[in-house]
Image: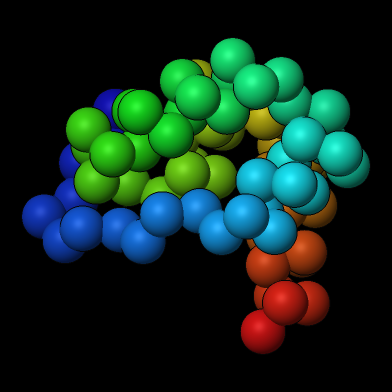
Amino acid sequence: MVFSSNPQPQASPQMLRFLREKLGLSENALALGQRQAEIEQAPLPVVLWSFGLLSLLQYQELLDWTLDQE
């Protein structure tokens, strides 16, 4: 588990769409990740990876996508 003392922002609708459409995550996986991210106050990508819902390659794709969004 990853716990942070600072609240993390919720995932944007664009990130959720990327996770669904490009990386193939199910609604159940996303719901689990979002609940756990809120409990842990941790970033959603880290939680998804730590639960094995994203491979290391998918995690890197998500990080690259995030950088492209800035």
| Image location (x, y in percent) of residue 26 | 71, 20
Of 11 and 67, nearer the camera is 11
Who's the residue at 24% across and 46% down the image? 41
Residue most extreme to the front: 13
Placement of the N terminus among the 4 image quadrants: top left
Residue most extreme to the right: 22
Left or right placement of residue 4 versus residue 32 in this view:
left
Can residue 50 be seen here?
no
Residue most extreme to the bottom: 70
Residue most extreme to the left: 5
Left or right placement of residue 37 versus residue 50 in this view:
left
Who's the residue at 77% across and 35% down the image? 20
Placement of the C terminus among the 4 image quadrants: bottom right
| Image location (x, y in percent) of residue 45 | 54, 45
Left or right placement of residue 61 versus residue 47 in this view:
right
| Image location (x, y in percent) of residue 61 | 80, 52
Who's the residue at 68% across and 67% down the image? 66
| Image location (x, y in percent) of residue 31 | 50, 24
Can residue 12 be seen here?
yes
Look at the picture and state if 35 lies above or below 44: above
Of 57 and 53, nearer the camera is 53
Who's the residue at 73% across and 41% down the image? 19
Left or right placement of residue 69 versus residue 10 in this view:
right
Q: Give the image quarter of residue 9.
A: bottom left
How many numbered marks appear?
0
What color scheme is it? rainbow
